[in-house]
Amino acid sequence: MKANIFLLHGYSGSPIDLLPLEKILSGRFPESEIESIQLPGHGNPQEVPSFNEDLYLKTLADKLGLIADPGRKKIYIGHSTGGTLLLRYFRDSGIVPDLLILIGIPADIDISFLERWSIHSDGGKAISFSSTAKLVSFINRQSKLVFETPFPILILNGEEDELVPPDHAFVWRERLRTSSRIVIIPSGKHHLTVSTAVKFCADTVTRAVEDILSGHEPDDMNAASGIAGIEPELAEFIRISSSSCRHIAGSPGGKRAVGREPELFPVLSTEPVFANIEITTRCNLECAYCIRSGRPHPVKDMDKRTFARILDLFPHAYRITLVGLGEPLLHHNPAGIVAEAVSRGRRVGLVTNGMCLDKEMGQNLLDAGLHSIAFSLDAPDQKTADIVRKGSNLERITDNIRLFTRAAKKRGR
Amino acid sequence: MFSAVSVNTVPCLEELVNLVSDLNVHILMLTDLNFPRNKEETLWKNINPETAAAVKKATLSAFSKKLPVLSVRRWRSSG
Ligand code: SF4
């Protein structure tokens, strides 16, 4: 499948800002047409043109409105204000992109933005007062954009973006309410595509483009349906994330579902469909066989945003297990973590030693949509438990398990 | 239910199966130990007729209680 891929730079920038990404995309998708659009007045590294919203939108209409090849997917990449202009253009024109990639786009501009601008431009290019006023007005007016037809959006933001901090990406996700994914690029600055972060950025972009272009074969669908016969939750996940079908079909379980042998290559063409995530390093036991025991361990809980970041990094991991060298129920909000993953259609399980699974915790986890639970228990009596799972209380654990399994059964799980 | 079994706990494995079968769980996953430092206590390093018989007896006991057993790590080779 071929595509038309358009790149649009930000205000005061030029296509040079996106050139490294453009080159990578050209190499990866040689059959696609890739065009980097230059906004009028841009391209002079010494000067910031005066901001002209109407002219920029007209330029987009002239360039993008003409492309009407139904056989090609349409993918748009906008950096900074270029992303906001694209959003506005799609709202006005009613055009529905196959994929929109937004890189470091500001959610709004306040007084602190101007301070950040002077850091960003390193005392160089200054924006005139009237352009600043027009830019602020344009950006802040886009906060209520509503799209009739949802379309996939990938939002990238540098973790160390000096102009548009990562918070803006999360504001956009809330605002757009469309199927959007956020990837925060470690140590990425505002010009993600011309920094050392370009590799990570380009890898994320090319994978997303690949997902749009690859679609899925009938065999992929058969594999996914085969697994959905065992795990009905998968059907809902595929509905939300149809591009995951190819990855699920390529997994060992997917291969087996259509009677094929799993392929074990060192480099796979598909992405992980399972993810084990350690949400806390805390534990209340000292099990004899655990490598955690007897070692100093910094105590830390993963916050919900970091957890969400991990989910976004693994968009095809429909099965999430909360497990690791820590007891997940000691996290300050395990049910909130479960709910976060469930809200994205993931099937969530956890592995627990059962010590903290009291009635309230159990109800909260079931309310949050927990799909499966595994209890770790190695000893049938307290004497053995004192040796192999030091710190555990067998009576409490078995009471908790009984209570939980009964409550789960009542809810048909 | 997920249970790690070592040479030290294999004698009480059948008792563990009895306990687990009363907890309304759907499946029992049995695994040998992992991590290099536990090597000396693993079943695969110390397999002998008594250990194999204990594993088999406990597994059959689980089946008789309609508790499916899933082998996770080197379990099948233990008997
Ligand atoms: S409960 Fe789990 S993490 Fe904690 S010491 Fe035991 S095996 Fe390790």
Image (tube, grey):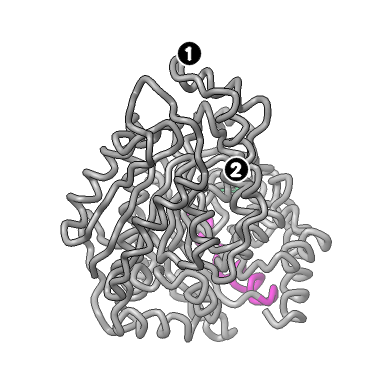
Residue A123 circle label: 1
Q: Which residue occupies the foreground of this view, A3 or A231?
A: A3
Q: Which residue occupies the foreground of this view, A176 or A246?
A: A176
Residue under the point 58% across and 65% down? A147
Residue under the point 64% across and 58% down? A340
Q: As displayed, is residue A39 above or below residue A263?
A: above
- Under circle 2, the secondary element is helix
In percent of width and height, residue A257 lies at 35, 82
User: As drawn, is A382 to the left or to the right of A50?
Assistant: right
Residue under the point 41% across and 45% down? B35
Residue identified by numbered label 2: A138
Q: How many marks?
A: 2
Residue found at the far top of this picture: A123
In percent of width and height, residue A209 lies at 33, 59
Amino acid carrying mark 2 in the image: Phe
Q: Which residue occupies the foreground of this view, B68 or A165?
A: A165
Q: Chain of mark 1?
A: A
Q: Nearer the viewer, mark 2 or mark 1?
A: 2
- Under circle 1, the secondary element is loop
Quick check: can you spot residue A327? no
Amino acid carrying mark 1 in the image: Gly
